[in-house]
Image (spheres, rainbow, N blue to C red):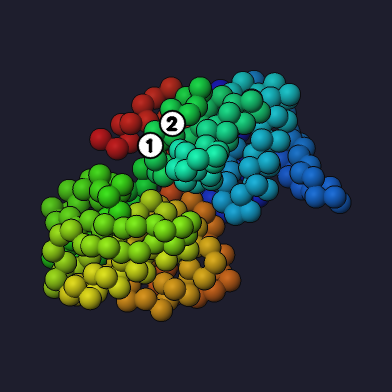
Amino acid sequence: MKLKIISGNANVELAKQITKHLGIPLSDAKVSRFSDGEVQVKIVENIRGADCYIIQPTNAPVNEHLMELLIIADALRRASARRIIAVMPYYGYARQDRKSEPRVPITARLVADLLATAGITRVLTMDLHAGQIQGFFDIPVDHLYGMPVLVNYFKEKKLNDLVIVSPDTGGAERARAFAKHFNAELAIIDKRRPCSNEASVMNIIGEVKDKTCIILDDMIDTAGTLTKVADAIKIKGASRIFAAASHGVLSGHAKQKIQDSSIEKVVITDSIPLLNNGPVEKVVVLSIAPLLAEAIMRISNDESISALFL
């Protein structure tokens, strides 16, 4: 079976690391721009009858990277690829997964439809903002979890008196699963969001006094919620504060907010490339390339993906 790994421009370094773990070269594909900004794609090598994996998280600039993914998929389909699998460790537009108010779109569903229309036959993603987004697809979706990578990091730290803090009620299940690995207590933040990218902490459910706290979320965007939660649990007497998330979006002044906060370390994965356009001393980046490489091999060999997390 021919296995081809193609990368867009969203996270080329991650694609290179995946091919290194697979022991195969990155396929020759040119993804560039015409002078007017349109995406230009050319698959240089023969991929007829091959399983083609497009490594392309849809991080910022999200629309550029999404269009690259769709156009690469179309090029592969027209070149007679056997299967086209979109490897999207970060799924952009995932937060627009429902009608939270009148006359707004469900953009996460729209993106799912676009991917299938472009010829993608399967999606491999990680830590979706809401698990039910898998139901937006009419093609198979393999949903990975970055939790094992994060758990291993904190186990090596050998932290005592741990409390896992969920920054909102929606993430309580994720935090509870994380806490089980450490036999740790759980705390939940009662949060209100008066508008987009702005949150306020209303109440803390659970005991954090004199505890080492790990604030766990699926993504860190502006870091507004994260730093407010850190401030709140610090006031309540938390002795040490860490944070962990699968996706480090880190938009706007997020890095500076983290740097100025009481958080010791923020641990993220390389699902999104960390751009060094600001302070990053407190940010630790863990690689998910081995996890994605193993998942790719299992898909190609028609083996179980869920067995990775048993």
Q: Quadrant of residue 306?
A: top left
Residue 272 is at least partly visible in this image: yes
Give the label on residue 134, or none. Answer: 2
Residue 290, image x and y in percent? Answer: 43, 45
So how many labels did they put on this image? 2
Q: Residue furthest bottom?
A: 260
> Residue extending furthest right?
35
Please state the horizontal and vertical placement of residue 198, each as a whole percent of the image: 44, 62
Q: Position of residue 16 (x, y in %)?
A: 57, 49
Relative depth, front residue between 68 and 82: 68
Q: Position of residue 282 (x, y in %)?
A: 40, 72
Residue type at tag 2: Gln
Provide the secondary structure element on which disc 1 rests. Answer: helix
Q: Residue at x 77, y 37 (%)?
A: 42
The 10 Å Cα crowd at callout 2, few under 14, some 14 to 19, many 20 or more, is some
Residue closest to the eye, 128 or 232: 232
Q: Is residue 110 above or below residue 225?
A: above
Report the residue marked by disc 1: 131
Residue drawn at point x = 56 percent, y = 51 percent: 59
Q: Is residue 247 left or right of residue 109?
A: left
Residue type indicated by callout 1: Gly
User: Can you say whether 294 is above or below 168 in the image?
Assistant: above
Give the SS element for disc 2.
helix
Residue nearest the observer in this picture, 182 or 291: 182
The answer to which quarter of the image holds residue 228 is bottom left
Residue 80 relative to residue 213: left or right: right
Q: Which mark is residue 20?
A: none
Mark 1 in CB contact with mark 2 (< 8 angstroms): yes
